[in-house]
Image (cartoon, rainbow, N blue to C red):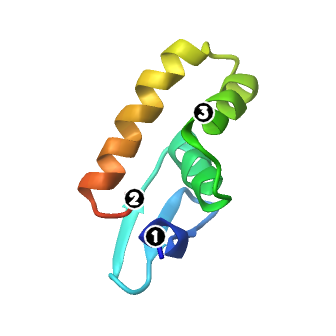
Amino acid sequence: MKLISQLQLAENNIAFHPSMGNSYQLNRVAKDIIGLLQQNRSKDEIITVLSDEYEISEEKLFIDVSDFLSKLKIYGLYQ
């Protein structure tokens, strides 16, 4: 099971991982990305959803989403 699926997202943009005991401060976009990952959305689907939601080009989002997913990998939350 991916650890990201265990993250609990709070209204105040805090993500808590109960089994690890870690919490993470997120911005709104990061929270949206994690929520979409928890829905088993692909990177391409996430980019499309965020592009529509925030009116940002998919090219710009590709770089930002890729960077965020890399950071999640570093934290061991995403593979």
- Classed neighbour count for the residue bearing mark 2: other residues with Cα under 10 Å, few (<14), some (14–19), many (≥20): some
Determine whether, in the image, residue 8 is placed left or right of residue 77.
right
Q: What is the three-letter code of the residue carrying label 3?
A: Asp
Asked whether 72 or 17 is in front, the reply is 72
Q: What is the three-letter code of the residue carrying label 1?
A: Lys
- Classed neighbour count for the residue bearing mark 1: other residues with Cα under 10 Å, few (<14), some (14–19), many (≥20): few
Where residue 75 appears, x then y in whole percent? 27, 59
- Classed neighbour count for the residue bearing mark 3: other residues with Cα under 10 Å, few (<14), some (14–19), many (≥20): few
Secondary element at tag 1: loop
Which residue is the site of mark 2? Answer: 78
Q: Quadrant of the C terminus?
A: bottom left
Dot 1 or dot 2, earlier in sequence? 1
Determine whether, in the image, residue 22 is placed left or right of residue 52.
left
Secondary element at tag 2: loop
Residue that sits furthest to the bottom in the current view: 19
Determine whether, in the image, residue 23 is placed left or right of residue 56.
left
Which residue is the site of mark 3? Answer: 44
**x 66%, y 37%: residue:** 45
Structural distance between the alpha carbons of marks 3 and 2: 16 Å
Secondary element at tag 3: helix
Q: What is the three-letter code of the residue carrying label 2?
A: Tyr
Cβ atoms under marks 1 and 2 closer than 8 Å = yes
**x 46%, y 51%: residue:** 26
Which residue is the site of mark 1? Answer: 2
Where residue 8 appears, x then y in whole percent? 55, 72
Does 17 sit above or below residue 51? Answer: below
**x 40%, y 44%: residue:** 69
